[in-house]
Image (cartoon, helix red, strand yellow):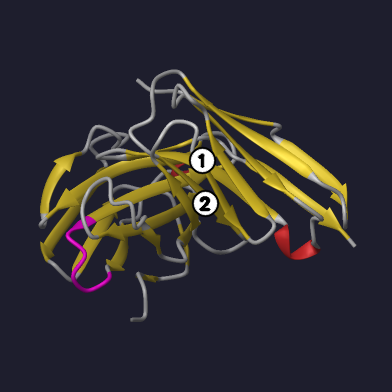
Amino acid sequence: DAGVIQSPRHEVTEMGQEVTLRCKPISGHNSLFWYRQTMMRGLELLIYFNNNVPIDDSGMPEDRFSAKMPNASFSTLKIQPSEPRDSAVYFCASSPFPGSGDGYTFGSGTRLTVV
Amino acid sequence: TQLLEQSPQFLSIQEGENLTVYCNSSSVFSSLQWYRQEPGEGPVLLVTVVTGGEVKKLKRLTFQFGDARKDSSLHITAAQPGDTGLYLCADSGSRLTFGEGTQLTVNP
C-alpha cells in the first residue's frame, strides 16, 4: 500500500485566493482526519470523518475552512479566502476505525504558505 | 478539554547518552500512543499502551504507562543521530489529541 497520499506537497498562494488540499487515505481505512501543524500550536485536529461522514468539525477555525469526503478514497480541505495566518503544514491521516490501536497513518503533509 | 503536556520541550544530547521524555495528561488516557516525526514528514506511530503500569520495549526505546493512566515516559538508551526528531504523545480516543512534543537532537 502506498500509504496516505497528499497533494500538493507545497503550495504558495496569495492572500484572498482559494486553496484546495487533497488526500487519498489508505484503502479500507474507515476514518480520516485533517490536522494543522504550526510551531505555536502544534498539531491541531481540524475535522474527522467516519465512513465518509463528518463527525467532529469543532476544530475548523472558521467558515473559511471546509472539508468534504465524497467517497472512501478521497477528501479535500478547502480554504476560501486564504489568509497569511493560515500558513502551516496540513496533514491528513487515516485509521481503520476511531481509537484504533493500530494507530493512525499520516501523509507527508502539504506545506501551505499564504503571502 | 484534555491537556497533554510534554517535557522537556527541547533536548540536545550527544550520541551514546541516555534520555527520558515525559507526557502528562489532565485526564485519564483512553489509550496512549507515541509518535516520532522527522522533518518534512508526518508523525509515525512507535507504540500504543493501554493498561496502567504497562511497559513496552522497541529496540533501544522503552515506553512506560503510569499506573493511573495519566502519564507516560519514553526512555532511549544509547541515543543515536537517527533518533533525532519530534516525539509526540497522543490520546487515541475517538479523536487523536496530541501533546506539543519534545524536539530531540542527537549530535554525533
Callout 1: few (<14), some (14-19), or many (20+) C-alpha neighbours within 10 Å?
Answer: many
Q: Chain of mark 1?
A: B
Amino acid on which disc 2 is placed = Tyr
- Name the residue: 38% across, 40% down: B50
Query: How far is the residue under mark 2 from the one under mark 1?
Result: 6 Å
Tally of numbered tags: 2
**Residue A46 or residue B49, whichever sits in front:** B49
Could you tell whether A22 is left or right of B67 in the image? left
Query: Dot 1: what SS?
Result: strand
What segment is highlighted magenta in the picture?
A: A26-31
Callout 2: few (<14), some (14-19), or many (20+) C-alpha neighbours within 10 Å?
Answer: many
Residue on which the image places disc 1: B89
- Name the residue: 52% across, 51% down: B35
Q: Position of residue A98 (x, y in %)?
A: 23, 47
The answer to whether marks 2 and 1 mark residues whose Cβ atoms lie closer than 8 Å is yes
Could you tell whether A51 is left or right of A63 in the image? left
- Name the residue: 45% across, 62% down: A109
Q: Position of residue A71 (x, y in %)?
A: 10, 67
| Quarter containing the N terminus of chain A | bottom left
Q: Chain of mark 2?
A: B
> Magenta span: helix, strand or loop, mainly?
loop
Sequence-first tag of 2 and 1: 2
Amino acid on which disc 1 is placed = Cys
Q: Is residue A29 magenta?
A: yes
Residue on which the image places disc 2: B35
Question: Picture quarter containing residue B106?
Answer: bottom right
Q: Is residue B49 magenta?
A: no
Query: Dot 2: what SS?
Result: strand
Where B67 sits versus A35, above or below? above
Name the residue at the bottom extreme.
Answer: A1
Q: Position of residue B14 (x, y in %)?
A: 90, 52
Say which mark, if any, is on residue A38.
none
